[in-house]
Amino acid sequence: MPATFVETSKMSGLRFTNQWKHKNWLLYHRWLWHLLFWTGYAVFRFWPYYITVSYYPSVFLVYMLFSEIMFVGITYFTIWLYTRFFQNKRYVLYSLVGIVSWLLFLCGRTLFQLHYLRNEPSFKGSTFGNIVLNNLTFVLIAFLFVTACKYFKDGYILQHVEEEKKQQQLLAEMNNLKSQIAPHFLFNTLNNLYGLAVDKSDKLPGLMLRLSDLLRHSLYETQKPLVMLDDEINVLKSYVELETLRLEEDLKLVFNNAVPTLTQHQIAPLVLIVFLENAFKHAKLVQAEPVEISINTTLQDNWFRFTIKNNYNHQKASSANGLGLTNVQRRLDVLYPQGRHQLTITKDGTFHTVTLQLQLR
């Protein structure tokens, strides 16, 4: 694999990771979760604080602030319990320890309340049992709510991290498939040139120039995830010219391109040329007959249609199936999923036809 391709693959993977992080702040900035939780809690507690400030002595406000410090402590202790027990599927132990911890928190806060507010006339008559019973439901709900928030946060992160891993795997697979297509293309073209070199054909210099143009495209343009549709069609034309120089009168080829020039639609690189290579490979198996190939390309709305038809020898056609076609089918599944492509391959005993439809950007 060329060093330039490896470096570009790493850069594209790094770029993908950075883009993902920018789009998913909640996955990579834990403080945002805490900020959201405590902001929501502050909104929830706003009304009791407003009533306290408006109608009660300042000692009640101080007590509430001290209570909030205790609440923060029990909340983060619960999160610690969650990571130690709940995430390890020790649900019963987590529930027992958690409930006992929140009951101890309630008892401790109640004792502090009785001591701190003992001189307040409006608080006299309150007993430990009454305060605990009045706040028991709220404390248990708070425990369940903190647990639910932690569960939701972990589930959200896990789901999106798995999605990121899947995207990274698809990206790695895509880069691997692209790296295989370029050598495959070079291998097929060099096979063509070898026969001409043995015969010392005058066609060889022209073919070498065409090959140079195609290799330049495969080495540089294909490092991009998408290329302009016009550029990819021009690559097909260059390959056709290369084969025309080689075959001359043994080739009957029609190339109808109905795609508007200067279109802004983009396509994955080296998707179409594999079918063109395959067509020439099939057609070479025809004995004592000219190679017949017809190519049609159209673009309607965002749908690009590519059709290539060639004659073949059905008795030898099985030997023409190779790595390139397998790879391009897998690339199509990755790049154009969920109904964004349709590939049809048919044979009628004389002609082999490939029809590819792609929904382009």
Image (tube, rainbow, N blue to C red):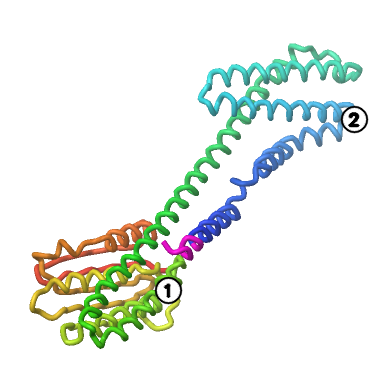
Q: Secondary structure at mark 1?
A: loop
Tell whether 161 sits left or right of 42: left
Tell whether 243 sits left or right of 361: left
Can you say which quadrant of the picture contains the N terminus?
Answer: bottom left
* Residue drawn at (64%, 29%) of the image: 79
Residues in magenta, as a range: 1-8
**x and y percent of residue 13 in the render?**
51, 57
Q: Which mark is residue 265?
A: 1
Can you say which quadrant of the picture contains the C terminus?
Answer: bottom left
**2 inside magenta stretch:** yes
Question: Count of labels shown?
Answer: 2
Q: Secondary structure at mark 2?
A: helix
The amino acid sitting under disc 2 is Ser
Label 2: few (<14), some or many (≥20) within 10 Å? few
Q: Quadrant of residue 208?
A: bottom left
Q: Main secondary structure of the magenta part?
A: helix
Q: Quadrant of residue 49?
A: top right
**328 inside magenta stretch:** no
**Mark 2 — residue?**
58
* Residue drawn at (25%, 78%) of the image: 295
* Residue drawn at (13%, 81%) of the image: 290
Q: CA distance from mark 2 to mark 1?
A: 68 Å
